[in-house]
């Protein structure tokens, strides 16, 4: 799902941005929903902390999760210039803020479940947090210069 959104975002250009803005906003909403569902599943684990072997598998899955979402966020950051010209700019920014909130909750809950791999999990969540903050910071500035917009148009 996140990889599909990354590919769709990469294809955005000056001509299809108005239609694709809604795709990005709804794509992030779906990701947020799926992460929230994952939090519910993590919260249902009542058997206590996972054994180290299982905790390592969780960290492996987390590492992949982080890599996929960093790739998506980096493409969204790269498309900032084009996306600021459409009315879906603010919903994208708000989706990034919401995504940060659910990722923070997931981190808290997941780390409690895998204490033997706590430091590895923290490193992964920190990596994702840096990229997420960069995306949020980028989308805090909605206006682009005319020169930048023209450059993006010529690249399309």
Image (tube, rainbow, N blue to C red):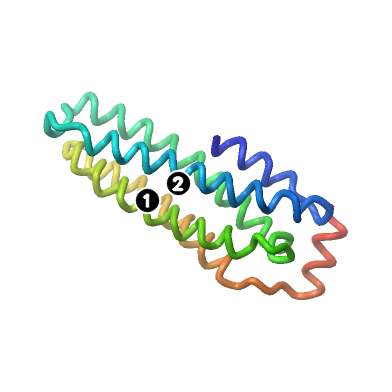
Q: Which residue is more in the foreground, 29 or 64?
A: 29
Judge whether 145 appears above or below 123 on screen: below
Residue 124, position as x, y percentages in the image: 36, 45
Judge whether 93 appears above or below 61 on screen: below
Disc 2 element: helix
Q: Which residue is more in the foreground, 36 or 112?
A: 36
6 left or right of 154? left
Q: Are marks 1 and 2 in contact (CB under 8 Å)?
A: yes
Q: Which quarter of the figure has residue 154?
A: bottom right
Inter-mark Cα distance, 1 to 2? 7 Å
Q: Which residue is more in the foreground, 134 or 86?
A: 86
- For the point 19% across and 32% down, the residue is 45
48 left or right of 156? left
User: Which labelled disc corresponds to residue 73?
Assistant: none
- For the point 84% across and 60% down, the residue is 153
Mark closer to the chain start, 1 or 2: 2
Q: Which quarter of the figure has residue 80?
A: bottom right
Q: Which residue is mark 1?
A: 102
Residue 61, position as x, y percentages in the image: 38, 31
- For the point 48% across and 55% down, the residue is 131
Residue 89, position as x, y percentages in the image: 64, 63
Q: Which residue is mark 2?
A: 32
């Amino acid at each position: 799902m996140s990889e599909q959104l990354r590919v769709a975002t990469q294809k955005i250009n000056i001509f299809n941005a108005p239609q694709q803005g809604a795709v990005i906003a709804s794509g992030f909403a779906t990701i947020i929903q799926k992460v929230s569902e994952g939090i519910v599943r993590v919260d249902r684990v009542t058997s206590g902390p996972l054994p180290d072997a299982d905790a390592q598998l969780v960290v492996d899955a987390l590492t992949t999760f982080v890599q996929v979402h960093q790739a998506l966020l980096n493409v969204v950051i790269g498309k900032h210039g084009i996306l600021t010209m459409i009315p879906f700019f603010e919903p994208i920014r708000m989706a990034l803020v919401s995504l940060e909130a659910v990722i923070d909750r997931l981190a808290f809950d997941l780390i409690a479940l895998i204490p033997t791999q706590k430091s590895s999990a923290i490193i992964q969540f920190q990596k994702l947090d840096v990229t997420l903050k960069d995306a949020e910071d980028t989308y805090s500035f909605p206006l682009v210069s005319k020169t930048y917009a023209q450059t993006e148009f010529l690249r399309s």
